[in-house]
Each structure stands twice: as structure tokens, then as C-alpha cells.
Image (tube, helix red, strand yellow):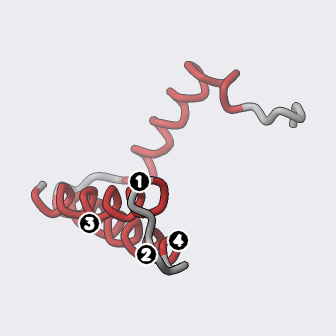
Amino acid sequence: MACITEEVGEVARVINRMYGSKKNKDDESLKDLEEELGDLLFTLVCMANAENIDLKQAYKRKMDKVFKRDNYRLQRKDGK
């Protein structure tokens, strides 16, 4: 859990640099965000594996729930 907290903090730091009051001086922010999200994803996968959780099934259940509850919010403005 501590690793996930650390990774989320790193994602937050990059997002803060991208959109917060202290902008990053280089154009590496999107690359940094990609790397940090990858780190977070890896950590989540490791945790799921350690607990024998099927992430495909967990994702499917979550998406089923989201589409039942919030389907109208997930539609594109052009109706597709």
C-alpha cells in the first residue's frame, strides 16, 4: 500500500507541474506523466498478483457498473 501511495504522489507531482501554479520549464511533463502512470500500473498489477486478483474480471465488473450508472455521461458529444 505504501508503494501505491508513493506512486500516486509522484503522479500528483507531475500533474501539479503540468497544470498547477508552478509550471515545469521543459516539455517533458507528458513523458513524465506517462512514466509515472506506468509505474503506478505496474505497482497495482503486482498487488493484484500477490492477492490472486483477476484484473480483467475486476475491470469488467467495474465497467459494467459504470455503464449502468453513468452511461449518459460517457457518450461523445457527436452522438457516437
Dot 3 or dot 4, earlier in sequence: 4
Give the CA distance from mark 1 to mark 3: 29 Å
Image x and y of residue 69, in percent: 55, 19
Q: Position of residue 41 (x, y in %)?
A: 36, 64
Q: Are marks 4 and 2 in contact (CB under 8 Å)?
A: yes
In-front residue for pair 22/51: 22
Looking at the rendered structure, the kind of residue marked 4 is: Leu
Residue at the (34%, 61%) spot, across then down: 11
Mark 1 Cα-neighbour bin, 10 Å: few <14, some 14–19, many ≥20: few
Q: Which residue is found at the position 45% from the left and 64% from the top?
A: 23
Task: Give the camera-side residue of 35 and 21.
Answer: 21
Report the mark closest to the observer, 3 or 4: 4
SS of the residue at dot 3? helix
* Residue to which mark 3 is pinned: 43
**Which type of secondary structure does the marked residue at label 4 adopt?**
helix
Q: CA distance from mark 3 to mark 4?
A: 20 Å
Query: Which one is nearer the viewer's eye here, 12 or 76?
Result: 12
Element on which disc 2 rests:
helix
Task: Decide which of tag 1 and tag 3 comes sooner along the chain.
Answer: 1
Determine the CA span between mark 1 and mark 4.
Answer: 17 Å
Q: CA distance from mark 1 to mark 2?
A: 18 Å
Residue 21 is marked as 1
